[in-house]
Amino acid sequence: MKTTPPLSIAVLGSGKGSNFQAILDAIRAGRLNVRVACVLSDVSDALILERARQAGSPAEFVDASPFKTKLDGAGEQRVLDRLRRHGTDVVVLAGFMRMLKQGLLTTFAGRIVNIHPSLLPAFPGMESWKQALDYGAKVTGCTVHFVDAGMDTGPIILQKTVPILESDTPESLHHRIQEQEHLAFPEALQLIAEGRVRLEGRHTRIRP
Ligand code: GAR
């Protein structure tokens, strides 16, 4: 672990926050040199906010209206204000279920990271584990990537694979993908914290 000052991350999530929990656990275990500047959610009773409060991190519901599926306009401005106020180096999307728009993408260009439950570019969008199962894929997994204007697109930082078993249900497959997510996200963030991820157009290069 380097002794450089920790990277300051803002975590955005809409749901239960198991990935955020994995990040917290990795920080506590000394595997991840980041500081949680704040946790923001567009869902007022999301479990991710409760987890943050219990961990002593600033946790705020942010009204993301006027839109339902994207973060734009006044809602985007409210999020930007919080990110600035809390001093954010990197924005971490941990189950944040809205598309980001130009204001955030420009302000934090190359500094927004997302986790997605498939081997992108396969199965973007919702319930990707179910999409993989329905398609008859034999392998799926998870992807940590930088965010661009597309839906679950952007330069890939790392991926982990999960075999799809004959006996899998959507729930069992989702569970095994999440186990891999909980390893992948802290690993990817630590690579960023160590300054080992270089962006080259659509590709990333990881320094050994
Ligand atoms: C994660 O599985 C993440 O990959 C997914 O939401 C879940 C959040 O779980 N994100 C997407 O599908 C984004 N397109 P969590 O709240 O327990 O971390």
Image (cartoon, rainbow, N blue to C red):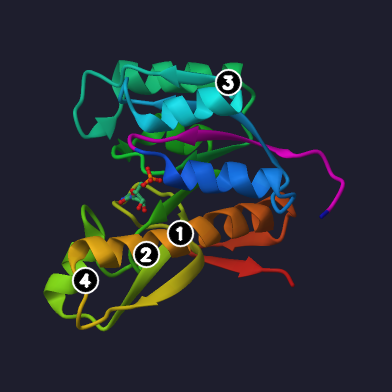
The amino acid type found where label 2 is placed reads Ile
Picture quadrant of residue 195: bottom right
Marks 2 and 1 sit apart, C-alpha to C-alpha, by 6 Å
From the image, state whether disc 2 or disc 3 is nearer to you. 2
The amino acid type found where label 4 is placed reads Ala
Pointers 2 and 3 in contact (C-beta within 8 Å): no
Range of the magenta residues? Answer: 2-15
Marks 4 and 3 sit apart, C-alpha to C-alpha, by 38 Å
Pointer 1 residue? 181
Marks 2 and 3 sit apart, C-alpha to C-alpha, by 33 Å
Inspect this view and state whether residue 110 appears: no
> On screen, 141 above or below 127?
below
Pointers 2 and 1 in contact (C-beta within 8 Å): yes
Q: Residue at x 39, y 18 (%)?
A: 61
Pointer 2 residue? 177
Q: Residue 30 placed where, x, y %?
A: 75, 49
Q: Is mark 3 within 8 Å of ligand 1?
A: no
